[in-house]
Image (cartoon, rainbow, N blue to C red):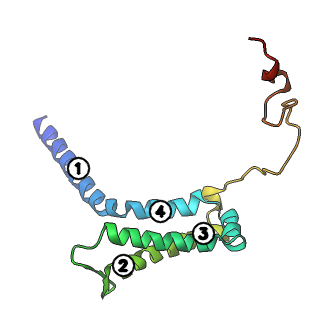
Amino acid sequence: MSELLISLSDLIVAAWSLLKAVSGLLLPWFPLAVWIGFWLCAVNWIKLREVLVSKGGLLGVLLIGAVWVLIWGVVAPPESGSHFILGLTLSNFVGKLVYVTALFCLMFLCGSVQLSGCCNQWCEVTMPDPHAHGDHGHGGHDAHGHSASHVIDHGHASH
């Protein structure tokens, strides 16, 4: 019986060591996985594409990226003073620009994958039409959405 308990404790220790090793490998990639998951499943790219292309939102996104590079470069400069990316030695702000550009490319790649219809089985979102007007059985409402029976004229109330 004691051999069984020793073997079981060895198995638990080995499983814990394996879990620590796997989490040590995957944990640094978790923010990137969240970034991809957000832009792939949580964003309605049909509406966002309309805003980016037709209404000039792409300029706002580029300005946000530029501010992101400036703030990130000032707040978190690399310890060695430069970034080493793909065998190149880049200065602080150029390295941050490469990182931000890569994140934006991933964002737009997720949008193109969603628009292609590859993700419909996982994240199909049907949005209600806000322009659809119809009587939903709520009765009469004033301009502020209050029922007509609850409107009180405060100008003629007695004190």
The residue furthest bottom is 88
Expressed as whole percent of the image width and height from the top left, the position of residue 62 reads 54, 74
Q: Which mark is residue 144?
A: none
The three-letter code of the residue at mark 4 reads Trp
Q: Which residue is mark 4?
A: 35
Q: Are marks 3 and 2 in contact (CB under 8 Å)?
A: no
Mark 3 vs 2, N-terminal side: 2
Q: Which residue is mark 3?
A: 111
Q: Are marks 2 and 1 in contact (CB under 8 Å)?
A: no
Horizontal side, residue 90 vs residue 108: left or right = left
Q: Which residue is mark 2?
A: 93
Q: Which mark is residue 16?
A: 1
Q: CA distance from mark 2 to mark 1?
A: 41 Å
Mark 4 vs 1, N-terminal side: 1
Q: Quadrant of residue 46?
A: bottom right
| Quadrant containing the N terminus in the rendered view | top left
Tell me the SS state at disc 2. helix
